[in-house]
Amino acid sequence: MNLYKHISESQLSISELMLPSHSNFSGKIHGGHILNLMDQIAFACASKHSENYCVTASVNKVDFLNPIEVGELVTMKASINFTGRTSMVVGLRVESENIRTGEKKHCNSSYFTMVAKDETGKSTPIPGIVLTSKDEILRFVRSIKRQEEAKDRTSRFNSKSFEMEEFLPLLINSNSKLLLP
């Protein structure tokens, strides 16, 4: 196993024509279909980098920015943004293209945390990444910050340490009704 790999060694891109069978009840492409494709390319990118089977550990922030229409060409790009000891963050970008007009839309960006597994199913070490540009360093550092923020969220809203009174002011202008004994 190489100790480090260049990001370009595992970058992938896939394109797929969106069919009527991929649509939801409103005639747009179903978000679940897009998530399935995203998981597949994240798996392929992570497996290519780690040279091992990989599993999805988490998905961070999936925002559907623009709808995708039947007949559009969807292109997904995947790249390793961060490497830990056994896990990596795969950055994904989803774009759709109207193949008649050439108009392109950014539809989604997301981050999949993938974990490399050995033949017995245990987490296994992976190569690090070689950072060669300001953008690559930015993506790496952003991944570190996202991980720190997730740990903070988890501990701050732990049910055993949650102080309800501290957060009651957030309910004042919310669409909720508070009925406590």
Image (spheres, rainbow, N blue to C red):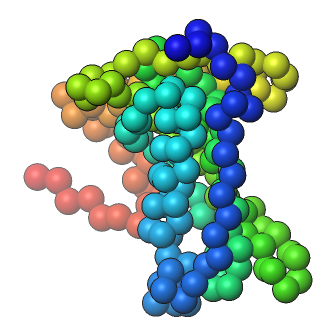
Toward the viewer: 155 or 96?
96
How many labels, in total? 0
Toward the viewer: 10 or 89?
10
Q: Residue at x 49, y 53 (%)?
A: 40
Relative to 101, does residue 137 appear above or below in the rendering?
above
The percent coordinates of residue 16 (x first, y second) are 64, 70
Relative to 37, does residue 147 appear above or below in the rendering?
above
Q: Residue at x 27, y 59 (%)?
A: 178
**Residue 163 seen by the camera:** no
**Residue 111 seen by the camera:** yes
Q: Is residue 48 left or right of residue 168?
A: right
The percent coordinates of residue 70 (x first, y second) are 63, 85
Q: Residue at x 40, y 53 (%)?
A: 171
The percent coordinates of residue 116 (x first, y second) are 41, 28
Q: Residue at x 55, y 34 (%)?
A: 48
Q: Residue furthest top?
A: 3
